[in-house]
Image (cartoon, helix red, strand yellow):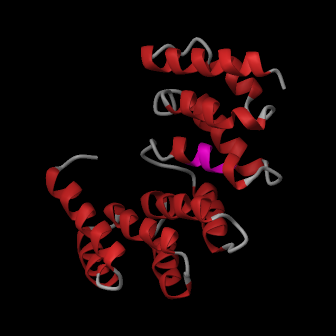
Amino acid sequence: TDPERDKVDRFCLQSLASMGSDVGVDSILRELGNRPHMTRAHCNYLATFVRENTDVRDGLVELLMTNRSSTDWELQWPIAALLNLDELPQNVVNHAIGFLNDRTRSNELRALSAFVVAKFGSGAARINLRNRWDEEDSHHVKSAMVASTMFFPPEERRILLGHWGRQDVLFEDVAKAVRAKLASGSS
């Protein structure tokens, strides 16, 4: 790798994103996944345009779905960018369920996957998420599960926040934060 190029790319991509300029989108999409150490910078830039540009969405989905050899650290960035969308194809949700259920995956990737399942999943996918609770041993993943209830229907969310929030001080704090966020109407 060329450390100077990486520095310039990081600076330029951050500047372009802050200006809302999509001038670098096509070149980043062509390069996506070829420089794994730049995945975070690339995905953060592309996240700016994922709602308006279907090529960006498709590129991020492809990176997520086809790069099984990628590290968990690399895979978490396209997931984070895709969370900006209002909908995702069910095959991506199924992929996220696979990550969530795979204990060999990092807790960070599994936690982000919980958000994908909660936000974009069908009722059956959310049941899968709920059923993971008793099997899950990671507080990190469980905290994400509590937070992800913000995407559940109100009655289901109320029940889960009440039940999960009573099981640990951390989960109680996350449940309070979810309630406060929803009460304030912020997203």
Magenta span: helix, strand or loop, mainly? Answer: helix
Image coords of residue 134 (percent x, y): 50, 88
Which image quarter: residue 19? top left
Residue depicted at 35% across the width and 73% down the height: 170
From the viewer's perspective, is residue 19 above or below residue 120? above
Horizontal side of residue 183 vs 118, given as left or right? left
Residue 36 appears left or right of 121: right
Q: Up-down: is 140 above or below 115?
A: below
Q: Residue furthest bottom?
A: 134
Where is residue 12 drawn, in percent x and y?
59, 14
Residue at image position (68%, 23%) is 28
Residue sitting nearer the eye, 138 or 54: 138
Residue 98 horizontal/vertical position (percent)? 66, 68
- What is the count of numbered marks? 0
Left or right of 95 in this view: 165: left
Q: Nearer the viewer, residue 8 or 50?
A: 8
What span is in magenta?
A: 75-79
Task: Tell me the residue at 54%/16% (across/down).
Answer: 22
Rendered-image quadrant of the N terminus: top right
73 is within the stretch colored magenta? no
Residue 93, compared with residue 82, is above or below; it is below
Q: Is residue 77 above or below residue 30?
A: below
* Residue occupying the point 55% across, 33% down: 44
Instruction: Determine the residue located farthest toward the left in the rendered image.
Output: 183
Q: Picture quarter containing residue 146?
A: bottom left
**Residue 187 locus on image (x, y percent):** 28, 46
The verdict on residue 76 being magenta is yes
